[in-house]
Amino acid sequence: MKKNEIVEPKAKKIEKVLKMHEHERIDEFYWLNERDNPEVIEYLEEENNYRDSYMKDYKSLENELFEEIKSRIKEDDSSVPYLENGYYYYTRYEKGKQYPIYCRKKDNLENAEEILIDANKMSEGHEYFRIGGIDISPDNKIMAYSVDTVSRRLYTVHFKNLETGITSSQSISNTNGGVSWANDNKTVFYNQKNVNTLRTEKVIRYVLGSGNNEEVFFESDDEFNLYSYKTKSGKYIIISSSKTISDEIRFINADRPNQEFKIFQKRIDGLEYSVDHLDDKWYIRTNINNSQNFKLMVCNENKTSSENWKDFIKHRENVLLENIEVFNEFFVVTERENGQRRFNVISKKDGESHYIDFEEEAFSAYSSVNAEMNSVKFRYGYSSMTTPNSTIEYDLVSRKKRF
C-alpha cells in the first residue's frame, strides 16, 4: 500500500468545557483520558497500526539505528557506589540484560557483594517492569522495595528479610514507590495514590506483620500533592504537602512513630518552605517576606512556626538559593547566579565559606547522593563541553577533588 493510500485515523471531537481561575476553555479531545473507554483503546490501536503501516519501509533503518545506539552503550556498566549506614550501595548491569542488579557491600568495597534485587529475574513474565524504590530499615535487616508492572506508577511495596532472604507475603498496593522507616525497624510510613487521578493524597502508617494500614493524613485539597521522607539526621519523619506556590509540613519523632504529626507551619497561599534537621535545629529554605529568590532560616526544633524563624542566609536579589545539604560540620548550599549553578560551602564551626572551583566557565553541576551526616566528602554530578558526565567527590576540609 502506498503512503498516500494509508487512511489516517481521526479522533472524534466531543466538546468539554474546562474552568480554572475564572477562565473557560474547550477541549475537544478530553474524552481520550478515559482509560477504560473501549473507543479510546480502539483509537489508540488505530494510531499504532497507522504508524506501523507508514513506517513499514523504514523497518530495516530502525533496526540499524537501534543497533548503532546500542553499540555505543556500555552494557556491563555500574553506578558509583555511595555509603549509607555502614553499606556501600550501587547498581550494575550485565551484558545482554536489560534491567539493573541492585547490590551492596558492607564497610568497604573490597568485601563480598550482596545482591539485593536482580531485576532481570524479577521481571520475568511481565510485559512491563519497573523498580520504584529501595528503602532499608535502620538496622539494615529488612528491605522495602516497590514494583510497577502495569506502567501507571502505581507501585506495590514488598518486604524482604535480608538475613533469611524471605519476602513477606504481605504487601502494600497503590503507593508512590517509597517508604520512610521509623527507628523501631518495624513501622513504615508510605504515600498512597488515588487509583483514578494518580494524585498522592494519603500518608499511611503500617507495622510489619500486622496487616493494619492506618491513615495518618489525608490531603483534601486536590491542588496539593504529598510526599513523605525521613530527615538526613534520622530523627524525624516528614510529611510535605505542596502545590505550586504553597507548602505545609508535618513531622513526628522517628523514635515515637505512634505519635500524631505536628504542623511545622500552617499553609499560607504564597508561602513556600522546605526543611531539614541538624542537631537541635531546623533549617528552612523559604520565600517568606517576599524573598522571591529564597533564603535560609533557622529555628529551634521545638518552636517551628514562622515567627520563630531567624535568618541564616539572607535573601539576595541576584542569587537564587536552590537547596541545602547538611553535614555535621558543614553546610553545602546550592545557589544560582547569572544562570549558573554553584556550591557554597559553609563551616558550621566558624561560618567561614568558600565556593567550589569548577575551573571552567560553562558547565552543568548538581548535588548527588550525600547520605552520611558525619562525612566531610560532598558528591556532585558534573559535565561540560569538554568533560563527560562525571561524579566528583569533594573534600570539604582539604578542598581536593576526586573523580
Image (tube, helix red, strand yellow):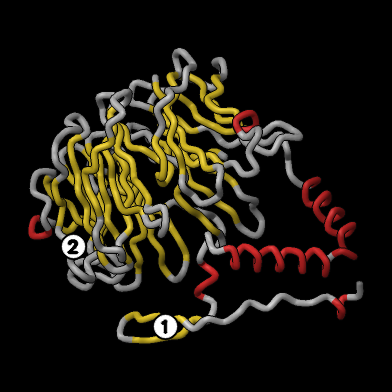
Amino acid on which the number 1 mark rests in the picture: Val
Q: In the rendering, at what x and y percent does residue 8 appear?
A: 75, 77
Write down the quadrant of residue 12 in the picture: bottom right
Left or right of 83, for residue 218: left
Q: Are marks 2 and 1 in contact (CB under 8 Å)?
A: no
Q: In the rendering, at what x and y percent does residue 93 appear?
A: 66, 34
Left or right of 178, for residue 9: right
**Furthest residue toward top:** 164
Left or right of 293, for residue 60: right
Looking at the image, can residue 25 be seen? yes
Rendered residue at 49%/16% (across/down): 165
Identify residue for label 2. Answer: 267
**Furthest residue toward front:** 38
Q: Earlier in the sequence, mark 2 or mark 1?
A: 1
**Height in image: 211 above or below 129?**
above
Rendered residue at 28%/28% (across/down): 207
Q: In the rendering, at what x and y percent does residue 277 appear?
A: 23, 43
Number of residues whose C-alpha sits closer than 10 Å to that of mark 2, classed few (under 14), some (14–19) or many (20 or more): some
**Height in image: 240 above or below 400?**
below
Q: Secondary structure at mark 1?
A: strand
Amino acid on which the number 2 mark rests in the picture: Arg
* Nearer the camera: disc 2 or disc 1: 1
Q: Which mark is residue 92?
A: none
Q: Secondary structure at mark 2?
A: loop
Question: How far, Cα to Cα, is label 2 from label 1?
Answer: 30 Å
User: In the rendered view of the protein, which quadrant contains the C terminus?
Assistant: top right
Q: Which mark is residue 17?
A: 1
